[in-house]
């Protein structure tokens, strides 16, 4: 659900019984230019409230959504989009079983205050030997390298690159040449706490990883990884360096023509290389599936690189239900579907 303003009635996808209902084609009489334009742009004229009653979409909501979509014309542009394949679905696979795991909670004695990819690899090996075929994980999207560190895996800076707090520092090439004993002592204290202190974990791992990077900045395989990832990874690293300089609120960044520090950009690309490598090692033990986040943070890399296609002043959430009668505002920026269509979804 995309929220645009507030009203006294709220949308719901189903009635109290949880069964989807089909809206009547002519629920209420609709007049006025705004309502007609809204309907042509795909805005529903009515919806079901959380109690299952049919509610007319308020005119102020229609206006707000039209404005957010940039619907300046009476009708949306006619564009030819790609067709979905007509091939039938593949046969269902044999039944199997696995685990649903929150990686941050998968701590071991060797963790640094948070479950990491080495813990996942060990758990995956044990699960495979126990007969499991897969592990379902929380989203692993990267966060901005700033404090306070964002703890929610569903509010990531990007859905493409990975969260570096899941790195096992000792498994990074070159770590054997760094004195990590003081950091391990701090990690042991963090590991003994019941709750995960993301800020301290991030700071501790950052200090240790920066030491390793100074000693081994060019591990084997890095060049080929950078070639495969291309400009997208470099843009992500540039964004992170600017976040470190100005904070994550990129809409208020000053006009900065200076190039980001090259060494710092290289560091952030180096981090992603090692996250990718450690995740690949874990995936060789068992099939891994990550949950798919609905969107991305409004001040993150994805919203920055796709800023031309994101609808301003709108936020994604969930419709009201019996537990949240005002609905839920997740704060995620939605894509403008007509701009995506105009860009041919590329």
Image (spheres, rainbow, N blue to C red):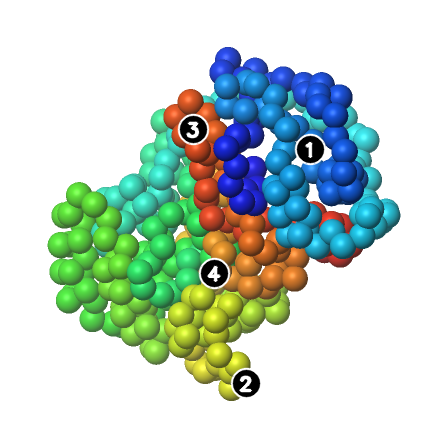
User: How many neighbours does mark 1 have within 10 angstroms: few (below 14), some (14-19), or many (20 or more)?
Assistant: some
Rendered location of residue 338, percent (x, y): 74, 50
What separation in Å lies between label 4 and label 2 (alpha carbons)?
20 Å
Q: Are marks 4 and 1 in contact (CB under 8 Å)?
A: no
Q: Are marks 1 and 2 in contact (CB under 8 Å)?
A: no
Q: Are marks 3 and 4 in contact (CB under 8 Å)?
A: no
Q: Are marks 2 and 3 in contact (CB under 8 Å)?
A: no
User: How many neighbours does mark 3 have within 10 angstroms: few (below 14), some (14-19), or many (20 or more)?
Assistant: some
The residue at which mark 4 appears reads as 299
Element type at marker 3?
loop
The residue at which mark 1 appears reads as 44
User: How many neighbours does mark 4 have within 10 angstroms: few (below 14), some (14-19), or many (20 or more)?
Assistant: many
What separation in Å lies between label 3 and label 1 (alpha carbons)?
21 Å
The tag on residue 325 is 3
Left or right of residue 180, residue 277 in this image:
right
What separation in Å lies between label 3 and label 4 (alpha carbons)?
28 Å
Q: Point out the frontmost of discs 1 and 2.
A: 1
């Amino acid at each position: 659900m995309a929220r645009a303003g507030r009203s006294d009635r709220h949308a719901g996808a189903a009635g109290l019984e949880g069964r989807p209902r089909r809206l009547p084609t002519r629920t209420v009489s609709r007049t006025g230019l705004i309502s007609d334009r809204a309907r042509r742009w795909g805005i529903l004229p009515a919806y079901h409230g959380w109690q299952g009653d049919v509610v007319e979409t308020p005119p102020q909501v229609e206006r707000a959504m039209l404005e957010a979509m940039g619907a300046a014309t009476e009708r949306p542009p006619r564009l030819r989009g790609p067709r979905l394949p007509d091939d039938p679905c593949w046969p269902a696979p044999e039944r199997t079983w696995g685990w649903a795991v929150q990686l941050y909670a998968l701590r071991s004695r060797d963790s640094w205050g948070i479950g990491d990819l080495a813990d996942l690899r060990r758990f995956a090996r044990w699960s495979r030997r126990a007969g499991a075929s897969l592990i379902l994980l929380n989203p692993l999207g990267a966060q901005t390298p700033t404090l306070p560190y964002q703890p929610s895996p569903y509010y990531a800076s990007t859905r493409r690159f990975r969260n570096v707090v899941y790195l096992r520092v000792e498994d990074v090439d070159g770590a054997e040449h760094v004195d990590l004993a003081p950091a391990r002592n701090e990690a042991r204290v963090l590991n003994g706490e019941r709750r995960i202190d993301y800020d301290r974990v991030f700071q501790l791992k950052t200090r240790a990883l920066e030491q390793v990077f100074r000693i081994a900045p060019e591990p084997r395989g890095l060049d080929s990884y950078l070639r495969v990832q291309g400009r997208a990874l470099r843009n992500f690293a540039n964004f992170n360096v600017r976040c470190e300089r100005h904070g994550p609120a990129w809409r208020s960044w000053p006009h900065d023509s200076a190039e980001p520090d090259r060494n710092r950009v290289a560091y952030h690309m180096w981090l992603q290389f090692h996250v990718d490598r450690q995740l690949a090692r874990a995936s060789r033990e068992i099939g891994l599936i990550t949950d798919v986040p609905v969107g991305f943070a409004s001040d993150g890399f994805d919203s920055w690189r796709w800023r031309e296609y994101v609808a301003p002043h709108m936020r994604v959430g969930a419709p009201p239900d019996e537990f949240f009668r005002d609905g839920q505002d997740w704060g995620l920026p939605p894509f403008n579907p007509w701009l995506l269509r105009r860009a041919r979804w590329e």
